[in-house]
Amino acid sequence: MLTVGIVDDGIGFVPTLTKLRQVVSAHFICMVDSGLFPLGNCNSAQLMTVGSHALAKLTELGCDAVVFSSVALSSRCLRPLTFAHPDATIFGCDAPVLHASTYTASRVLVVGDRFAVGSITLSGIIPVPMPDFPTIAESGDERDVVRYISECCEPFYGQFDCIALANSSMNVYKHCFSRVFPNVHIFDSLEGVARKIRKKYRKFSKDDSFVNVIDANGADISEKYSIFLD
């Protein structure tokens, strides 16, 4: 059976895993590299180091394809690593800004870490860095998540038509954004990679796959994330 590796620095891997299990029958190895958490605060060289290590380790563990769940990691590493490793199959989860812009034609609120938000240069967007979101997301307290979303985004209320989530941990709390902005369409970073994987691999009806969660050294840390996987 196909084995897919998923790379992130925290709980952002969970919605990526959930989405991919809907579109492809595979075993999954989820690498949570928290050594430089949050990755959105890293520079390009640091992101490339993390991405290169993850690709090498997951390939060593037998993964047929690797998905960069972190938007920052995907934005920086996908192209150069695909070029450097033409035999590897690498997918990325990108900030859904173009999709959102097509949906509304204008006025997209883009929320994410400094790296992802700062790398977007399209017109018609309102960039809102939320650097503390990954840390708050790891706590699992939705009240704090909703409070932080409100503090960062409500000053722009009425100025945008939709929201694009440019951080993988935000996908876990997509419903919290809907609580703050109940009438606004919200785009996450998962539809693009799901379409690409669905196109490349066929999902079989029988699904006896397993899920492992490991750290950057390959040690099993599944128990740490069991609350999000149950």
Image (spheres, rainbow, N blue to C red):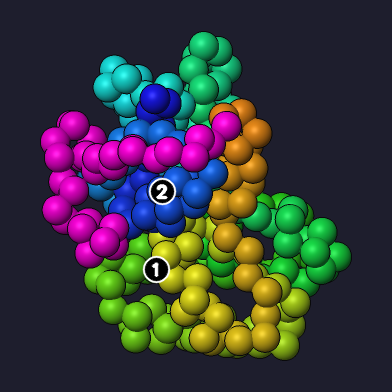
Q: Is residue 127 above or below residue 40?
A: below
Q: Is residue 119 left or right of residue 37?
A: right
Residue at the image point whose x is 47% and y is 85% from the top: 151
Task: In the rendered view, tell whether residue 146 sits above or below residue 109.
Answer: below
**Residue 224 makes an appearance in the image:** yes
Question: In front here: 52 or 89?
Answer: 89
Amino acid at dot 2: Leu
Look at the picture and state if 135 lies above or below 12. Answer: below
Q: Toward which corner of the image does residue 104 lie, by quadrant? A: bottom right
Q: Quadrant of the N terminus?
A: top left
Residue 33 x, y percent position in the rendering: 27, 42
Residue to which mark 1 is pinned: 133
In magenta, the rendered stretch is: 202-230
Left or right placement of residue 152 versus residue 63 in this view: right
Q: Which of 5 and 83 lies nearest the eye of the viewer?
A: 5
Q: Quadrant of residue 228?
A: bottom left
Place of residue 20 in the rendered image (x, y in percent of width and height, measured from the top left): 48, 45
Q: As drawn, which residue projects farthest toward the top?
A: 87
SS class, disc 2: helix
**Residue furthest to the front:** 206
Task: Name above or below for residue 44 compared with residue 102.
Answer: above
Q: Residue at x 29, y 58 (%)?
A: 229
Marker disc for residue 107: none
Whether residue 222 appears in magenta in the rendering, the answer is: yes
Q: Is residue 75 visible?
A: no
| Residue at horizontal 28 percent and vertical 72 percent from the top | 140
- How crowded pointer 1 is (Cα within 10 Å; few <14, some 14-19, many 20+) is rated as many
- Count of marks placed on residues: 2
Looking at numbered disc 1 in the image, what kind of residue is underneath it? Phe
Question: Badge 2 is on which residue?
Answer: 17
